[in-house]
Image (cartoon, coloured by chain):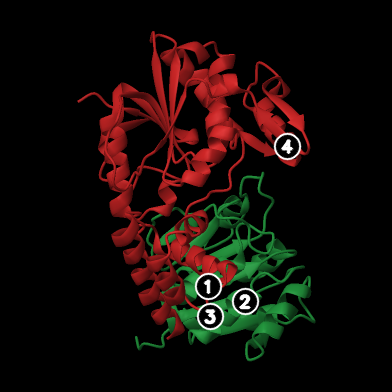
Chain colours: A red, B green
């Protein structure tokens, strides 16, 4: 019974967040968003999800705090090194044939994936001719991504991942460490456009050669996954590339037929010509 | 089937998991009608080798759980390493990369709590051997939703801490040796 009441409360919370502030989580995968809402309730000190909803409706300052529970992903640089190795060895040779490139990191969170791709493109000599678009719905996350500062304690893991990705340089070439933090070089973010963009409610904004959107779609229900994948299809240039998370696939999507496997084991797809 | 019929089985195991599951899963007959959802704590950097290990030894289909896949009877689903496994309201499976729970991803609590939400009284939750307390809160959620809570006997488990923690959180759970757990499962077949 408790669970049923919470389901109703959650539905009302998501409606309030949408109707009042236009953040639309109504088609996020329910089981995860419920865990996150319950965690936010406990951490922010409300007696129930309803109490949190009331505060949210009347006090806009609750929004960013709630968003940080509902959206922020824990990621790491060069997570799943084989994905980056596959980009380096199989996708980059195709991208090198273009005079200028656009890459979209959709759902960039704190920017770990963005900096990984930027380093990879610099190593492969494409840094100067690539514009990156790093988008997220969470303004705090976008600010953190733009800052590019990570706890120094994580750098060893990032360095290992980077090496496994077939690195042509040392990760330490790209950051300065100070006071327990590593600040990544501004040359990596010079060609990056950081922008608020929602895969739920916003539209195509540029023609991309590569879209990397990993471990974002697992948080969406099937309808919303289809919306995002339709957006990716329409945003990609002819024969453009799409990279998903290692446990994500197009199998259950109605857009499966719009793409073909490019590197199957690393979930890299190529848009089919139509 | 009545409302109280069991519709799915969720199992959590940690230290000693492989030896213990090897005494349970191969005993299930091909006609076993329910999905079996399993979280085993495995190191995040390693590919989950459990599927390969158990596929050869089990009459049931054995696979790694996929995001947005419907859980069907007669199939054993293992959570992939470094992802949480959850059950959605309609019995579809979901994965998440949310932060570790009880220092674990996948976490037993995450599976059990979401599965209890989904299957309500139709869930059987089983906490096996392990050296931490993951699964305790989850098993309590299973019992609170009206499902069946079962704990491996700590006295005979490979490692007793996890069953003990589950019993402390869920004192009414049935306590069984591995053989008793197999009997309970066979009654569902």
Residue on which the image places disc 4:
A181
Q: Which mark is residue B142?
A: 3
CA distance for labels 4 and 1 = 36 Å
Residue on which the image places disc 2:
B137
Which of the two residues, A244 or A19, is positioned nearer the viewer here? Answer: A19
CA distance for labels 2 and 4 = 36 Å
Q: Secondary structure at mark 4?
A: strand
Residues packed near mark 3 inside 10 Å, few (<14), some (14 to 19) or many (20 plus): many
Tell me where residue A27 appears, x and y as whole percent: 33, 58
Tell me where residue A202 appears, x and y as whole percent: 29, 42
CA distance for labels 3 and 4 = 42 Å
Q: Answer whether residue B60 is visible to the viewer in this image.
A: no
Pointer 2 and pointer 4: residues touching (CB < 8 Å)? Answer: no
Residue on which the image places disc 1:
B113
Pointer 4 and pointer 1: residues touching (CB < 8 Å)? Answer: no
CA distance for labels 3 and 2 = 9 Å
Picture quadrant of residue A123: top right
Q: Are marks 3 and 2 on the same chain?
A: yes
Does residue A1 sit above or below A57 in this rendering? below
First along the sequence among labels 1 and 3: 1
The quadrant of the picture occupied by the N terminus of chain A is bottom left
* Chain containing mark 2: B
Q: Are marks 3 and 4 on the same chain?
A: no
Residues packed near mark 4 inside 10 Å, few (<14), some (14 to 19) or many (20 plus): some
Pointer 2 and pointer 1: residues touching (CB < 8 Å)? Answer: yes
* Chain containing mark 1: B
CA distance for labels 1 and 3 = 7 Å
First along the sequence among labels 3 and 2: 2
């Amino acid at each position: 019974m408790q669970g049923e009441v919470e389901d109703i409360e959650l539905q009302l919370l998501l409606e309030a967040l949408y109707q009042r502030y236009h953040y639309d989580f109504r088609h996020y995968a329910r089981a995860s968003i419920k865990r996150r809402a319950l965690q936010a309730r406990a951490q922010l000190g409300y007696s129930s999800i309803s109490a949190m909803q009331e505060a949210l409706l009347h006090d806009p300052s609750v929004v960013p705090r709630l968003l940080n529970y509902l959206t922020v992903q824990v990621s790491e640089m060069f997570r799943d090194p084989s994905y980056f190795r596959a980009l380096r060895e199989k996708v980059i040779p195709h991208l090198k044939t273009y005079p200028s490139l656009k890459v979209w990191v959709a759902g960039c969170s704190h920017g770990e994936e963005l900096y990984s791709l930027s380093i990879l493109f610099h190593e492969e000599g494409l840094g100067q001719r690539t514009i990156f678009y790093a988008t997220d719905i969470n303004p705090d996350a976008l600010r953190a991504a733009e800052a590019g500062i990570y706890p120094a304690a994580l750098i060893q893991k990032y360095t290992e991942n980077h090496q496994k990705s077939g690195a042509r340089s040392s990760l330490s070439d790209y950051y300065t460490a100070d006071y327990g933090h590593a600040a990544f070089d501004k040359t990596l973010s010079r060609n990056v456009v950081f922008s608020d963009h929602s895969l739920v409610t916003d539209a195509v904004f540029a023609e991309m050669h590569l879209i990397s959107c990993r471990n974002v779609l697992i948080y969406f229900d099937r309808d919303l996954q289809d919306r995002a994948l339709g957006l990716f299809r329409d945003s990609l240039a002819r024969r453009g590339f799409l990279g998903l998370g290692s446990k994500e696939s197009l199998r259950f999507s109605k857009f499966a037929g719009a793409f073909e496997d490019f590197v199957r084991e690393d979930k890299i797809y190529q848009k089919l010509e139509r | 089937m009545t409302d109280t019929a069991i519709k799915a089985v969720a199992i959590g195991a940690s230290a000693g998991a492989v030896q213990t599951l090897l005494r349970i899963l191969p005993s299930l007959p091909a006609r076993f009608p329910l999905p079996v959802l399993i979280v085993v704590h495995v190191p995040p950097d390693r590919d989950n080798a459990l599927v390969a290990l158990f596929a050869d030894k089990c009459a049931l289909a054995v696979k790694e759980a996929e995001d947005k896949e419907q859980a069907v009877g007669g199939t054993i689903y293992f959570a992939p390493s470094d992802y949480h496994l959850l059950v959605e309201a309609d019995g579809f499976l979901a994965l998440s990369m949310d932060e570790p729970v009880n220092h674990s991803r996948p976490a037993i609590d995450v599976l059990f709590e979401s599965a209890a939400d989904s299957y309500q009284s139709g869930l059987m939750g089983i906490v096996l051997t392990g050296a931490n307390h993951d699964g305790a809160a989850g098993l309590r959620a299973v019992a609170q939703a009206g499902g069946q809570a079962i704990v491996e006997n700590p006295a005979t488990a490979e490692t007793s801490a996890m069953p003990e923690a589950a019993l402390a959180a869920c004192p009414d759970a049935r306590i069984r040796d591995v053989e008793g757990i197999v009997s309970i499962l066979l009654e569902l077949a």
